[in-house]
């Protein structure tokens, strides 16, 4: 007897015209993202229904995928679907049982980079930002490879200090069709702040403000705040913090353990929507200071002076830190200081830490740890390790990059010499059996010695500089 093809009972019911549309939309919105796509082959009615915006709107709102901020009223069904499919593919690659994440494509930037006198970054995993002595240029990495070498935007101003650490950016609005970012760089003893926008109809650039930049060694930026790190003559000198939307300036003392210029090498900084976190790493512990930003505990703000509200000790030496966002990342980036509100007195961050450090040994174990800071009554902190994994990298120097939002994240560690490149899927959900999973990131064979330039977890894209002057873009999912 010949075999007959059958359909699920639910699919057969859906094909009946009497099945209400609103119930159909509700059913589809509760299915996994890739299952919605597959069901389009069942019948024309499901096919048509699967393009309704209300379905993808509900899926986006209820998803635990790593997603950019949204959904926004301007985002159509197709854009929401693309973001969700991309996130589903990234999750499948990073969280699957396999031991590695294969790459789907590798492209080399056609322009050779200078050996010296440049620094670079990548905005939203797409726009390659190159700073050279004569100015800044931006290149669209989603254009056909033959068009990569032509900048889509440039700001030629001369006298740019093209040194690592003096170029940074913050994306404060991101959709598939519109990306806006603040960019900070140093020229002629000034920090220049630009607003750059990339849209489907063109590119735009606008100078926003200039800040003093004498003896600057690094610039940090997030949530609309700019923190210049500068050399100092006396330990009692103050640091300056600037708020871009309001153009206000605030001051705060340096960390209480910073006494000499060399001490700046042991500092890490975190800017959250509500707090500035200063961390000073010692051999076996890290001293943490918390400064509420304007609008949070504003009673402590006098004459634009930030006051430390909490101090505490983390019992390991921290090497590198990245924020781990429990809320959408840029939800507060456009707000003025007076509109932000304190949530649950809780900060999370991802850190590379030295553990079991022997005073007589040159090396120690390095771990990747997800850490929670809870603010207790008074001025004390409770610092808790939520989950961790050991990195077997010996004496290698290790860099850390992370993309996180609403309690989930993807991270990459890059260790040299080696070089070792590992990927991590991380969840802040304490109910998971394995909240942190590690894999190897597969790489093209011709990429030997290299430097991690940028990682974008929303796209599953890695950018590296290798051979001193080549930039490669490696994608780990096929873009939908």
Image (spheres, rainbow, N blue to C red):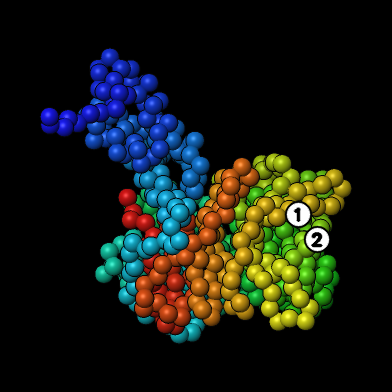
453 sits left or right of 152 in the view: right
Q: Report the residue that reaches farthest toward the bottom.
A: 115
In-front residue for pair 404/261: 404
Q: Position of residue 63 (x, y in %)?
A: 48, 39
Q: Tag on residue 391? A: none
**Marks 1 and 2, how far apart at CA:** 8 Å
Identify whether 377 is placed above or below 102: above
125 sits left or right of 38 in the view: right
Q: Which residue is mark 1?
A: 383
In-front residue for pair 352/1: 1
Judge whether residue 388 can be spotted in this image. Answer: yes
Q: How many marks can you see?
A: 2
N-terminal label among 1 and 2: 2
Q: Position of residue 217 (x, y in %)?
A: 65, 75
Residue 247 in which image quadrant: bottom right
Cβ atoms under marks 1 and 2 closer than 8 Å: yes
Q: Tag on residue 313? A: 2
Q: Report the residue that reaches farthest toward the front.
A: 1
43 sits left or right of 96 in the view: left
Q: Residues within 10 Å of mark 2 (few under 14, many from 20)?
A: some
- The kind of secondary structure element at disc 1 is strand
Q: Report the residue that reaches farthest toward the right.
A: 378
**Residue at 29% in and 27% down:** 8
**Residue at 78% in and 48% down:** 375
């Amino acid at each position: 007897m010949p075999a007959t093809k059958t359909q699920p009972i639910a699919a057969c019911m859906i094909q009946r015209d009497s099945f209400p549309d609103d119930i159909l939309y509700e059913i589809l919105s509760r299915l996994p993202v890739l299952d919605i796509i597959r069901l389009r082959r069942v019948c024309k009615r499901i096919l048509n229904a699967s393009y309704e915006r209300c379905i993808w709107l509900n899926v986006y709102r209820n998803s635990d995928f790593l997603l950019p901020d949204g959904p926004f009223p301007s985002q159509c069904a197709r854009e929401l679907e693309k973001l969700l499919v991309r996130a589903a593919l990234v999750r499948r690659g990073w969280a699957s049982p396999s031991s590695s994440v294969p790459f789907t494509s590798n492209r080399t930037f056609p322009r050779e980079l200078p050996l010296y006198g440049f620094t670079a970054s990548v905005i939203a995993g797409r726009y390659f930002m190159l700073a050279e002595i004569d100015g800044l240029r931006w290149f669209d990495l989603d254009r056909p490879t033959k068009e990569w070498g032509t900048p889509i935007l440039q700001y030629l101003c001369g006298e740019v200090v093209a040194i690592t650490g003096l170029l940074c950016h913050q994306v404060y609005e991101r959709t598939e069709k519109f990306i806006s970012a603040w960019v900070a760089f140093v020229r002629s003893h000034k920090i220049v702040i630009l607003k750059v926008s990339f849209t489907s109809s063109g590119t735009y650039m606008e100078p926003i403000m200039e800040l003093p930049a004498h003896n600057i060694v690094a610039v940090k930026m997030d949530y609309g705040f700019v923190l210049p790190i500068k050399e100092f003559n006396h330990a009692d000198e103050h640091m300056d913090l600037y708020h871009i939307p309001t153009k206000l300036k605030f001051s705060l003392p340096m960390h209480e353990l910073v006494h000499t210029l060399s001490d700046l090498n042991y500092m890490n900084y975190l800017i959250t929507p509500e707090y500035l976190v200063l961390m000073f790493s010692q051999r076996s512990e890290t001293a943490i200071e918390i400064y509420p930003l304007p609008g949070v505990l504003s009673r402590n703000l006098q004459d634009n002076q930030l006051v430390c509200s909490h101090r505490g000790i983390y019992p390991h030496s921290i090497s590198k830190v990245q924020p781990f966002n429990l809320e959408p990342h840029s939800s507060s980036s456009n707000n003025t200081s007076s509109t932000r509100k304190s949530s649950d007195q809780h900060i999370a961050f991802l850190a590379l830490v030295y553990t079991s450090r022997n005073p007589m040994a040159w090396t120690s174990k390095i771990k990747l740890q997800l850490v929670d800071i809870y603010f207790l009554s008074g001025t004390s902190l409770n610092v808790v390790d939520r989950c961790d994994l050991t990195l077997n990298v010996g004496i290698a120097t290790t860099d850390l990059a992370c993309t996180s939002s609403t309690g989930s994240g993807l991270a990459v560690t890059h260790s040299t010499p080696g070089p070792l490149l590992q990927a991590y899927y991380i969840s802040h959900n304490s109910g998971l059996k394995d909240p942190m999973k590690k894999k190897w990131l597969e790489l093209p064979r011709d990429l030997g010695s290299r430097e991690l330039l940028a990682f974008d977890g929303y796209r599953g894209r890695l950018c590296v500089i290798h051979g001193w002057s080549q930039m490669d873009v490696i994608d780990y999912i096929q873009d939908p």
